[in-house]
Amino acid sequence: MTSAPTPPVPDSDLLAHLRVDLHAAGFTVDGVEERLGTVAARALRRDHALPAARALAGDDPLAVIVRLFCLNHAIDTDVVERALPTVGVAGLVGLGLVAAEGAAVRATCDLRPHACDSAGWWLASDLPESAVGGPLPQDHVLGIGGASTTLATWTPRLPVARALDVGTGCGVQSLHLSQHAEHVVATDLSARALGYAAFNAALNGTSWELRAGSMLEPVAGETFDLIVSNPPFVITPRAAGVPLYEYRDGGRSGDAVVADLVRRVGAHLAPGGIAQLLGNWEIVGDDEDAWRTKVASWVEGTGLDAWVVQRETQDPAEYAETWVRDGGQQPGTRAHEQLYGAWLDDFASRGVSAIGFGIITVQRPDRERATFVDLVEVTGPVAQPMGPAVLAGLRARTWLAERTDDEVLDTAWRCADDVTEERHSRPGDTDPSVIVIRQGGGLRRAIRVDTLGAALLSVCDGELTARQAIVAIAGLLDLDASVGLADGVTLVRDLAADGLLLAN
Ligand SMILES: C[S@@+](CC[C@H](N)C(=O)[O-])C[C@H]1O[C@@H](n2cnc3c(N)ncnc32)[C@H](O)[C@@H]1O
């Protein structure tokens, strides 16, 4: 496997010229989507270039830029010169973004627009598999992938003084952090990744402190208000012949990279600081709670609050197929089968029955109190973006951790506007046999409640305290009030944690 080319050069004068041309051409997420059409734009995001190539007739600047930088076509020099007249071909060569190929030029890397609600950027990264045409180089620097987007959309976007991006890659998380952090430190083990991060920061008119080194080593003794990491979490056999892809493999056995990150990240969180991490974890045995036991053990003794959402699981074979294929190996080839076998042997050696993927949010309490550890499984769709719900959920869990059950019961609660109720009954029955409370936003929870729970929610208008409401309802239902209060406070805590009930 060959090494990928040198990352582009962050020459500020040439980048200023490039920005003029990219702006003028409308090289934005919306501009490209409109030019390609939804189907071709979505295919391109899945690294399938053919529909986009078919959609791009003509030599208008946007078509040329997309063909050059997103489809990796060789394009005649004079066509490129007309499409990017300010930076020009000489400027693109000077930036290291294109190389001559006869009378044409071809991009040396991928460059595409990226956006969130409030900002738009451009991001350079290594050429994707479709352009490389075979297994990726081991020092490949990833563009924006599904995991990058997941982390970006789950990160709470609160204003902070100091933020850290561990394993920055091409710098996508740092671009988002630049929107709400005064100072961003970004680390990576890969010199090539840091090269791309420096280029992307300059291209987008921002700057980060870039530091080389493994995981948290480059920030020894420092603390941050917000830490994000889409770490190299892919579980890879440590066996001869299995390539180590820097962009996904931290070089440790099993899930040790993520376990270590969770155990150590607290030392780098300022009081009240939050770390938002992605991870894979190995699940051993068939016990439904095995993943909880595993992930809780990482948090144990750290003094941190933790809220972990398991989003999906794969069995060992599915997991092996995903990551052998991700490296560019085609099923049915000898290389594919050897790697597939190595993954299966590795999982078997530790008795792994499944691999979980999820989002780990930890927080350093800003005062002495009992910590919370909440581990939930949510495999369905959730709000987009989730960041606001994560922040609200942390705030709510913190509030609950600081209060006794009596204080929770003596609070007046209001049912959130996105909560609805479903009643299901057998045909002909007057009373429902199932009552489900549904949340429209956040984790989109669906919770089955009993008559007392449904009645309690129906009177949560911010006037009555939970205690007053439960005692009154217990009287009407002829229930023991103390039992109602014990059940009621558990329900209120559960609903309040995820924002279905709001303290007035
Ligand atoms: C999955 S990529 C994430 C890139 C980017 N932050 C994102 O969200 O798309 C993981 C990154 O971690 C880096 N990495 C791998 N091993 C590392 C280590 N031991 N310490 C720090 N970074 C590492 C890789 O070079 C890669 O850039």
Image (cartoon, helix red, strand yellow):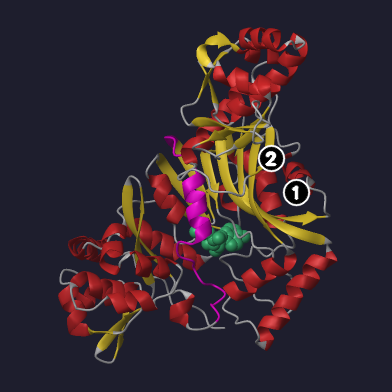
Main SS of the magenta part reads: loop
Q: Which residues are magenta?
A: 135-160
Residue 297: image x %, image y %?
A: 77, 43
Horizontal side of 418 relative to 345 (left or right) equals: left
Which residue type does callout 2 highlight?
A: Leu
The verdict on residue 287 being magenta is no
**In what element is the residue under mark 2?**
strand
Residue 402: image x %, image y %?
A: 64, 19
The residue depicted at 67 percent of the width and 22 percent of the height is 451
Which residue type does callout 1 highlight?
A: Trp
The numbered mark at residue 291 is 1
123 or 218: which is nearer to us?
A: 123
Q: Quadrant of the N terminus?
A: bottom right
* Residue projecting furthest to the front: 428
Q: Are marks 2 and 1 in contact (CB under 8 Å)?
A: yes
Q: How many marks?
A: 2
The answer to which quarter of the image holds residue 40 is bottom left
From what the image shows, is residue 484 above or below residue 294? above
Ligand 1 resides in the quarter of the picture at bottom right
Q: Which residue is mark 2?
A: 375
- Is the distance from the Cβ of mark 1 to the nearest ligand 1 atom less than 8 Å? no
Density class for disc 2 (Cα within 10 Å; few <14, some 14-19, many ≥20) is some
The numbered mark at residue 81 is none
Residue 263: image x %, image y %?
A: 70, 44
